[in-house]
Structures are given as C-alpha cells and as structure tokens.
Image (cartoon, grey):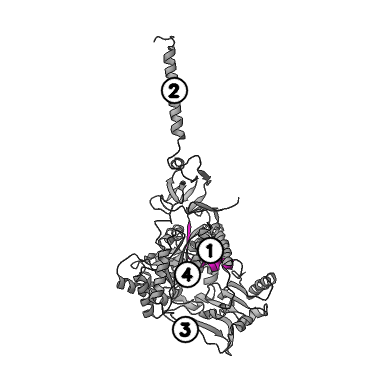
Amino acid sequence: MKSGQRLPCTAFLAALLLLVACVASLHLACSQEPAQPADLVLVNGRIYTVNPAQPWTEAVAIRGDRIVAVGTNDEIARHAGSATRRIDLGGRLALPGLVDSHIHFLSGSHSLSQLDLNGAATVAEIQQRLRDYARTHPGTGWIIGRGWNYTTFVPSGLPHRKQIDEIVADRPVLLEAYDGHTQWANTAALKAAGVTRTTSDPRNGKIVRDGNGEPTGALQESAGSLVERLVPQPSREENLAALRAGLREAAAVGLTSIVNASGGTDEMELYAELERRGELTLRTYTAMRLRSGMTAADFDAAVAAHERSASPWVRAGILKGFIDGVIEGHTAAMLEPYADDPSKKGELNFTPEELNRLVTEADRRGLQIMIHAIGDRGVRVTLDAYEAAAKANGARDRRYRIEHIETIAASDATRFGPLKTVASFQPLHAYPDISAGGVWPRNVGPERLERAFAWRLAADGGARLAFGSDWPVVTLNPFEGIENAITRETKDGQPAGGWIPRQKVSLEEAIAAYTIGGAWAQFRERDFGSVETGKLADLVVLTADLFRIPPHEIHKTRAWLTIAGGRIVHTKAE
C-alpha cells in the first residue's frame, strides 16, 4: 500500500477484532483464579523460617491448616484468589509458632487468679501482697499462692509459718515456692492437715522442723501433699475457665505448641473438650507419670492413651519421672556433698536399678521418657538408665529427654549426642537474680558453679536443645527466656557480660530451641517448627524484630499476630 492510502474497511475491522481479542486474552490470563487459592496470605514480612535451605523470606500462603507456599511477594501473589484474605506485615519479623517444651499448663492457668509472689524480694513485700490478697478475697476459705524465692530467706533459704500467721492466722494459707518443690503453710493449714511434731516424713519428702521438733511450715518435696490434699479441687467448669484464660496468655506471646509435663488423662480430656468446642488454640503433648512400682497394666494404660490420641491438638505418649529434687532445698542428687553442708548429697527418688527397670519397660513399649534431673548425680543416673534401655531393646528412634539439668559433670555432657537425648532447659531458671543469688551458688560451690545451667556445654556435647518455661515456675513468655538465654543478665544488665557467660547460646540457637528443637523433642519436626511448604500453618508475627533490637529489649516483645493451624488466634490492638 502506498503512503497516504487508507486501510480497507474489512482489513481495519479484522485488525481491530484481533486487538480486542488479544486484550481480552491478556485480561483473562491476568485475572484467572488459581486452581486452589489460598485462604490467607502474609506479605511484606521479614520471615525467619528456621529452615536452613531458605532461612529468610517475605511472604507465605496458607490454605486450610497448612502452608502451601513460601517465597517472595510476587510468588505468593499467584496463590491469592478473590476470596483470599491478605495481611500486610509491614516489614515485621515473623517466626514459626513457638513451642514451650516443659510447662504445667493447667496449674499455670489457675495461678493467674491466685496470689502471685513472683518478684517479691523481701518478707515484708510477701506479707504486703498476702495482706492485699486476703482483703480482696475475704472469707474463711483457703488462700493459695506461689512464686516465693529461697533467696528471700537467706541464710536458711526456707520460710517460717509465723511469717504468714502475722498477716493471716484465721484461715489456712498454702504458698508454693517458685520451683514447685517446697510448700509454705501457716499454722492454720498445718492444724487442718494434722501435721504435728509427731508426724513422720513421707517417702521422698521432709517436714522441716525447728530446734524443738515443731514443724516450721516449710514442707519439702512430697511432704507438701500432706497439706495440699485438703485444698478444695476446682470443678470441671472451673478448670475449663482457667484453661481459656491460659490459652489467651499463650496466644498473646506466640505459643502454638506445648509439652505438658503433668496432668495425665484427666487433663487431656479437658483439652479434648476444648477442641470439640473449637476453642483449643495450642497443640498439647501431655505426660503420664513414671512412678515407682508401675505394673504392666500401668504401662498398658499409657500405651492405650497414646494410641487414642490421634488428634494433632491433643496427644499422649510420654512418661515423666523425677529422679531428684532441687538444689536450694538440698534435695537434688549430687555426686559430691553440698558445699554449704557436707553432710548432704541429696537423695535419689528411684534406686538406679529400679529406674533402669522402669525406663527399659517403658522404652520396650515404644513410649517416650522425660526425667526431671537437676543434680549432677541425678543426670548421670538418668543417662545410665537410657543407655541400659537402648542396649536392652535395640536400635530405634527414641528421643530420650532430661529436664532442667541445673548441674552436670563435664564427662556426662558428651553422652547426650550418642544417646540422641534432648536437653530440655528452661532459660529463666538461670535468671541471675534468682539462681545467682545467695542460696543456689552457695549450695553447689565454686567448682560446680562453672557448669551451672550448661546450655552451651550440653549443645557442644551433641544434645538437642529444647527450651521452655516450667510455668507457673516462671512466666510462660518465651521472649523473656530468649533474652536470658543469650545474655544471662538481668533486665538491667547485671552482672555485666553475663552470669557464667560461657554457657550462653546465640539468638539463632535460642529461636531454634523454641521452635524446631521443641518440635523434634515431640517427634513432630515434619509437622511444625519451621516455616516450610506442607507444614502446619503455625506462625507468630512479632511486635519487635529480635535481630534488630538491643538484647535487653527482647523481653518486651509480644505477638502482633498468632496463627495456629491456619486460624488467627491472637491479634494485638494497635
């Protein structure tokens, strides 16, 4: 066609139709719904996945209760449909849902409404809190509280009933130490329980007495049950109400999974009821008790509970035992005598032979085992039992656990790796104003002090680290635990450089111990613990970026958004 000539009308119409078709085709391609659109996408985040193959990303797509894609904003946009909910994280840090690997969730939930003595530094402060609580909770019924610290009562490390009687004498009072291993009763409570100078110490327990043989009100280990048995038990609805309050607390700090170190089948049924009602927002793995004299029928019952717990939210399959007590009360089992009292080494709750038998039988039936072992002898005897069971029953994936490990012989730290044993620590147990105070270091002495709460030593020995709280022993807030794990300093930076700083861990290690380490300790690392395609959609978005703030600011962090199984279970008001 020559210049200046017009396109014939038919040719012009054909070209126009072709252009319209191209535009329509392009629009259809751009607007077409994905075959299976995501229900929820999180975009514009700093997502630390705890997946070594892809440590950082910026967006996640979720469908149902699973993660269906992890990647860039553009990659995740392809999974969004017209009904997909989109949440802009605004550059906030996100992590896998956090795991508390050692908690007492029901008792912690009830503690939210009881007398709180945590942080009370003097007897006068304890008495004032008791006075205030009694005034706001009038009547003649029991006053129950917890959280007092042995350091408050230096030099003895133990309280006296008269200190309660001065404030409340006309009703029974029972106050539990922060670690749960000593009860403090007033005279009215002792009288109600019939505890007198002629009452014998129970097995694995001690009624502390004065120079005249009279009970002081301090009841160590199993002796506490002499009074505890009289405390009115909450109803089923009261337990459920307490758990609802606990679930709100857990969601607000990003917890999506716990190992419940007590409770058994009765507590599991409460979780199952909440699950049936659509109210359970926390994955629970609840321990049964490993106790002296267990029969074949007892082990069968534990196996049956495990086999019945097919839910991803309510599970069993682990037995929890106590080999010893606590260092502050001289009840933790030590290899050498206590530095402050050479007449004491602590006692084992099982003979080594009995523990070997129980552990071997539980292991033979495929049950997981967790043992409270605080003293270095307790840790050694527990490792010996695990070694004996493995030898007797042959190779398999066991994932033995030891809980607390406040002291350890250097030669035993290297045994964790070959036995594939989990070192289950609670970082706030080593908070300097508690453990570095007068009683704990005084009792262990300077040589053992170098291996106090030895997270680094255990990790270097091949242990799998799993961190938790032991709530209500300390707060269930994992960010306080993370801060102490990497600083070993108080919130105001004391002691400078940290208490026994060689036992610190890095921020990445601490996060791993609260995520993939906790999942591994439950045999569930394929389900959660990292942000990966195919895993359960358990995530937490934080109010602060742990990688960009000063370490002593970490404890102030909370959950901006918590997602459990693809469901938003907590949002923080701006």
Q: CA distance from mark 2 to mark 1?
A: 63 Å
Q: Secondary structure at mark 4?
A: helix
Q: Amino acid at mark 3?
A: Lys
In x, y percent, where is residue 439?
Answer: 53, 76
Q: CA distance from mark 2 to mark 3?
A: 93 Å
| Mark 4 lies on residue | 264
Task: Point out the tag, 2 or 1, that comes first from the N-terminus.
Answer: 2
| Mark 3 lies on residue | 344
Viewer can see residue 284: yes
Q: Secondary structure at mark 2?
A: helix
In x, y percent, where is residue 360?
Answer: 35, 74
In x, y percent, where is residue 155?
Answer: 57, 80
| Mark 2 lies on residue | 19
In which quarter of the view is residue 231 placed?
bottom right
Looking at the picture, does residue 270 appear above or below residue 141?
above
Q: Amino acid at mark 2?
A: Leu
Q: Which residues are magenta?
A: 97-113
Identify the disc placed on residue 476.
1
Q: CA distance from mark 1 to mark 3?
A: 33 Å
Q: CA distance from mark 1 to mark 4?
A: 20 Å
Task: Point out the tag, 3 or 4, that comes first from the N-terminus.
Answer: 4
